[in-house]
């Protein structure tokens, strides 16, 4: 999980977090 969050660049909203995580998983 830490690797995923390290790739996320300061999202503005929780929705953006979900979208970025989904883009990494899918």
Image (tube, rainbow, N blue to C red):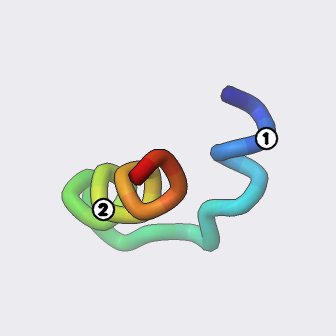
Of the pair 19 and 24, the residue shown nearer to us: 24
Residue 20's x, y, as percent? 43, 63
Determine the secondary structure under disc 2: helix
Of the pair 25 and 3, the residue shown nearer to us: 25
Between the residue at mark 1 and the residue at mark 2, the CA separation in whole angstroms equals 16 Å
- Residue 3 marker: 1
Q: Residues within 10 Å of mark 1 (few under 14, many from 20)?
A: few
* Numbered label tally: 2
Q: Is residue 7 left or right of residue 12?
A: right
Q: Residues within 10 Å of mark 2 (few under 14, many from 20)?
A: few
The image quarter in which residue 11 lies: bottom left
Extreme residue in the front direction: 26
* Residues at discs 1 and 2 in contact (Cβ within 8 Å): no
Q: Residue at x 76, y 32 (%)?
A: 2
Q: Which residue is labeled 2 in the image?
A: 19
Q: Is residue 6 left or right of residue 10?
A: right
Extreme residue in the left direction: 15
Which numbered disc, 1 or 2, marks the residue that appears first in the sequence? Answer: 1
Q: Is residue 10 above or below residue 5?
A: below
Residue 14's x, y, as percent? 27, 52
Residue 24's x, y, as percent? 53, 56
Quadrant of the rendering where the N terminus is positioned: top right
Determine the secondary structure under disc 1: helix
Q: Residue at x 30, y 62 (%)?
A: 19
Q: Residue at x 79, y 41 (%)?
A: 3
Residue 8's x, y, as percent? 61, 62
Q: Is residue 6 left or right of residue 24?
A: right
Extreme residue in the top direction: 1
- Residue 13 marker: none
């Amino acid at each position: 999980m830490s690797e995923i969050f390290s790739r996320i660049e300061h999202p503005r909203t929780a929705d953006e977090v979900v979208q970025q995580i989904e883009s990494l998983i899918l």
